[in-house]
Amino acid sequence: MTVKEALETASRKLKENNIENPINEAKYLLKYLLKKDDVFFITDLNYELTDEEINEYEQLVNKRCAHVPFGYITGIKEFMGLDFHVDRETLIPRPETEIIVEYMIEHFKGITLDILEIGVGSGCISISTAKYLENVNILGVDINEKALSIANKNIEYHNVDDRVKFIRSDIYENVEGKFDVIISNPPYIRKDIIETLEDDVKKYEPILALDGGEDGLYFYREIIKNASKYLNESGHIIFEIGYDQGEQVKDLLIQNNFTNIEIINDLAGFDRTVVGKLK
Ligand SMILES: C[S@@+](CC[C@H](N)C(=O)[O-])C[C@H]1O[C@@H](n2cnc3c(N)ncnc32)[C@H](O)[C@@H]1O
């Protein structure tokens, strides 16, 4: 079987199983398996796959047809131009979460900062922030020990263990000290919405990373109400939010002594990030 034939068969199968962009997905899976670049898929479509390659490709395609997210198949997801190890204990980093890191780079380059991240998952936010900002020290927490073991693997992989440390904590439970910035992309999906999410998310991603309580705002309330105990004077708080949570999170911040509140949109034009400064 040639690369061209394998791609055609896989695309058909992925399409039948309602996978969006089946042609691209078929290519990404084969690219991952063969470890080839894009040029190969233009110039070598007649390359004959070995029996072993055909077999392995079929297994990858079957997993994707069962809606296992691409990141969990490969065990790697790119974020801020860096590769992160992921598994089913960690949320797969999303491109819209990069807004938080981009905000940090734009506003805090060259400044020495102590940062607290709540809900680190794979560690993608803290680690990429440390990679791009040299003068930061970051403490990250997560309630899920198994996610923390992947996050720690990513610390090692990116060689930032001198500036990033992750510990287990239920929000602030085991946090000591004061910080200049608190960052969080907390679970923010309303409980009743979770069942309606696409299979890729609801069947495979950790519920601990999704469930934001009855109204989706549980973590914002808990983090904001105690933030002043952990923030230095004029400290910042930066949240990722759901597309319809901007005004509610802004109100929570105002009620808790935050000012200069900014709601930032993602590329699709939805509210995605909220920033506030402690008065
Ligand atoms: C939406 S995920 C974000 C992961 C990662 N920061 C990212 O942006 O990809 C939220 C994370 O919060 C963690 N979490 C859930 N409840 C928590 C709690 N009570 N205290 C600390 N972390 C919690 C979850 O385990 C999950 O890793």
Image (spheres, rainbow, N blue to C red):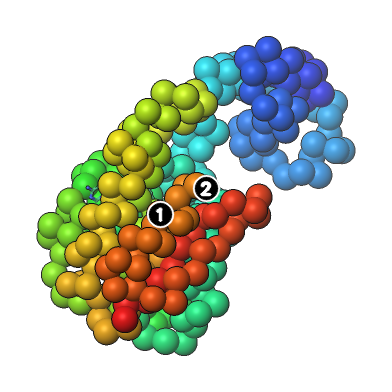
Position of 57 compared to 42: left or right?
A: left
For the residue pair 231 and 215, the one nearer the viewer reads as 215
Q: Which mark is residue 243?
A: 2
Residue 125 seen: no
Residue in the image at 32% along x and 77% along y: 278
Q: In the rendered image, which quarter is residue 146 located in?
A: top left
Secondary structure of residue under mark 1:
helix
Ligand 1 under 8 Å from disc 1 Cβ: no
Structural crowding at the residue carrying mark 2, measured as other residues with C-alpha within 10 Å and reported as few (<14), some (14–19) or many (≥20) = some
Question: Could you tell whether 210 is left or right of 23 in the image?
Answer: left
**Which label sits on residue 248?**
1
Question: Would you identify the image quadrant in which residue 89 lies?
Answer: top left
Q: Report whether 15 appears left or right of 141.
A: right
Q: Circles 1 and 2: CB distance less than 8 Å? A: no
210 w.r.t. 270: above or below: above
Q: Amino acid at mark 1?
A: Gln
Q: Position of residue 110 (x, y in %)?
A: 46, 87
Secondary structure category for the residue under label 2 = loop
What is the spatial separation of the Cα atoms under label 1 and label 2, in whole angstroms?
A: 11 Å
Residue at x 55%, y 33% (from the top left corner): 70
Q: Position of residue 20 (x, y in %)?
A: 67, 27
Q: Quadrant of the C terminus?
A: bottom left
Q: Residue at x 52, y 55 (%)?
A: 272
Query: Is residue 36 visible from the viewing direction of this image?
Result: yes
Front position in the image: 271 or 23:
271
Mark 2, ligand 1, within 8 Å: the answer is no
- The percent position of residue 49, horizontal first and vertical second, equals 72, 22
The vertical placement of 258 against 144, above or below, is below
The reply, left or right, for residue 160 in relation to residue 4 is left
230 over 208 or under it: above or below: below
- Residue 40 place in picture, x, y as percent: 79, 40
